[in-house]
Image (cartoon, grey):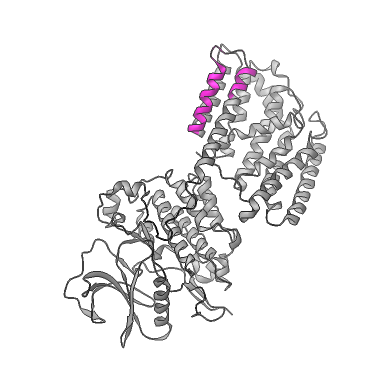
Amino acid sequence: MKRFETSVGEEPSTLPLGSCDPSEGPPGAAGSRLALGRYRLDRPLGAGGFGVVWLGWDERLEREVAVKAIPNEGQAGQRVEREARAAARLNHPGIVGIYELASDAHDVYLVSELVRGRTLAELERAGAISDRDVARIGVALCDALEHAHARGVIHRDVKPQNVMVVADPAAGAGFAKLTDFGVAHIRAGETLTRTGDVVGTLAYMPPEQADGERVTPACDVYSLGLTLYEAWTGTNPVRANGPAATARRLGRPLPSLAAARRDLSLELCDGIDAALDSDPARRPTLGRLRAALRAAESELADEGGLAEPATRRRVGLPKTEQRGLLRRRRVAVPAGVAGSEDPYPAPAAPLRLLQRIGAGALGGALVLAALNALGPEPPFSSPAAAGLAALAISLMPRIGWLLGVAGVCLWLASPEAGRQGTALVVAAAAAPVPFLLPRAGLLWSLPVLAPLLGTIALAPAFLGVAALAGTSWRRTGLAAAGLLWIAVAEALTGEALLFGSPTGTLPRGAWEGSVTGAASSALEPLLTTPALVLLAVWAAFAATLPLAIHGRWITLDLIGAGLWTAGFITAHFAVGDMLAGDVPLEQARGAVAGAVGAALVAFSVSRVSAPAQGWRAPRVTTA
């Protein structure tokens, strides 16, 4: 029987150790109580389950301090001693510092540095943090937790109430600080809880911690990921109406961050989703999570956040002249400070540059091919137009891609070109792509690989490419877009790239100059016959390919690849039987070779990624 020592909600008035309302001035000289002969306790800052936190004045060193006073009885005193021992191991700007642990006949006192600021929970309730603020807070907490883990301390209670956002980071205190190590696990230290006891806050607790299993640094990664998820969405998907209901949600798959915040980058969403994996072995390290946060920080919005003086005044934070520091926290950290090393210096920059260049090149090639193959020779330079499109897509993937497609369609539909029907078909192929792949502008040109593979009878191998996308939604979207482009390419070229164009499709010469002709002779057959039934098949198999090949055990991967390939081939044969009489070919071109090729691509990527932490697909910028 497990004994839970946990909370689901926290009182808004409760302040963590070391926190102070920044709008208040320093304590007066004549406090109401003197503790330990030197600490003048001026007024209470907050109360929790184990005692009261006071704003204090150290009369010996003449400095402000925070003093937690806990009745010297039962496990309360033991827990404050544990907090002191854990925090005493640590010396980091992202962790509230401990000055002294002492007691008298009545109380145990834990004296710490006084941090003027607000808790993350308070700022969330006030709507006073921007998306960029959340990323900065996450980076600071990753640094703090890395420092703690390196010294054998696992926090076990990371949550918004235990995160202090400082009033003036320019004063050298850092942007955010982690506090309250009262339930921290100290490696090789004695255990204060009995076997099977569970400590922490249930709504932020990883499943393995709730089950009483061995505590590892991955526990703090989960809690931090959930804290950031809540800050970005305003909702904790684990918290329910009561402890029992909350406990039932532990270990269940959580909704993707991308589903709640479709405006955030896919890379960032994938990083947070990975941190919330129920399997601790599959969660990223703090270094990798920090890298994802740093990479996304410059792209996140700052409106309504702490960089704005009006916001800071509204929540009682004093004005700072270091506005630039708040906007771009790229300050140097003193050498020798643990956690100052950056083992991933701008890790995404080279990859992101290559992705942008690749997307631009592919989009430019599409524009060049369309201008040269689908209409008369234009009066302008096709290579120059393709180059401009490539540059625009590289710099502004979504806007550039839309402008490139619009430019091609406008030229084809112009009286000079006289290809209004062709323009309609091209637009029909391009229009669904932004909806199938929202926010993933660098992927919008990738479906062209599907018809290109079809020219060598390997169209189904495109699913191996689609399966590299980071989420199931991206994989299904890529697969559906690829199949759609195959169908349109078959109508435009008259070639059978998979099953061939459905019955009723006329050669392009019969409708290329007529919008109504294109609608009735090229698009209508696709919609009135079951030719697109393969969309669902491709989407389903693209989504499940990474599930069949995990990248963790080669034997299971080979079995999974074999089963997936057999299922994909069988599905193509079944669809061929269904489409008999509606398409030229009874069997899909490349059904066997393409399925094997897709599995080989996925298996190869899984082997390359396996040494790290399982198959994690390359992240793609979604601008």
Q: Any magenta on residue 368?
A: yes
Residue 372 rendering spot, x and y as whole percentages = 62, 17
**Magenta region, residue range:** 367-396
Residue 380 rendering spot, x and y as whole percentages = 53, 14
Q: Residue at x 36, y 54 (%)?
A: 127
**182 up-or-down from 421: above or below:** below
Q: Residue at x 55, y 30 (%)?
A: 360
**85 up-or-down from 148: above or below:** below
**313 up-or-down from 280: above or below:** above
Residue 326 rendering spot, x and y as whole percentages = 33, 49
| 112 and 6: which is toward the camera | 112
**440 left or right of 558 in image:** left
**71 left or right of 453 in image:** left
Q: Main secondary structure of the magenta part?
A: helix
Tag count: 0
| 348 and 280: which is toward the camera | 348
Task: Residue 515: tell me if it is visible.
Answer: no
Quadrant where the N terminus lies?
bottom right
Q: Any magenta on residue 145?
A: no
Q: Residue at x 68, y 50 (%)?
A: 607
**36 left or right of 367 in image:** left
Residue 598 rendering spot, x and y as whole percentages = 72, 42
Q: Residue at x 72, y 38 (%)?
A: 461
Determine the residue located farthest toward the bottom in the rendered image.
105
Q: Which image quarter: residue 182?
A: bottom left
Task: Residue 253: tell me if it is visible.
Answer: yes
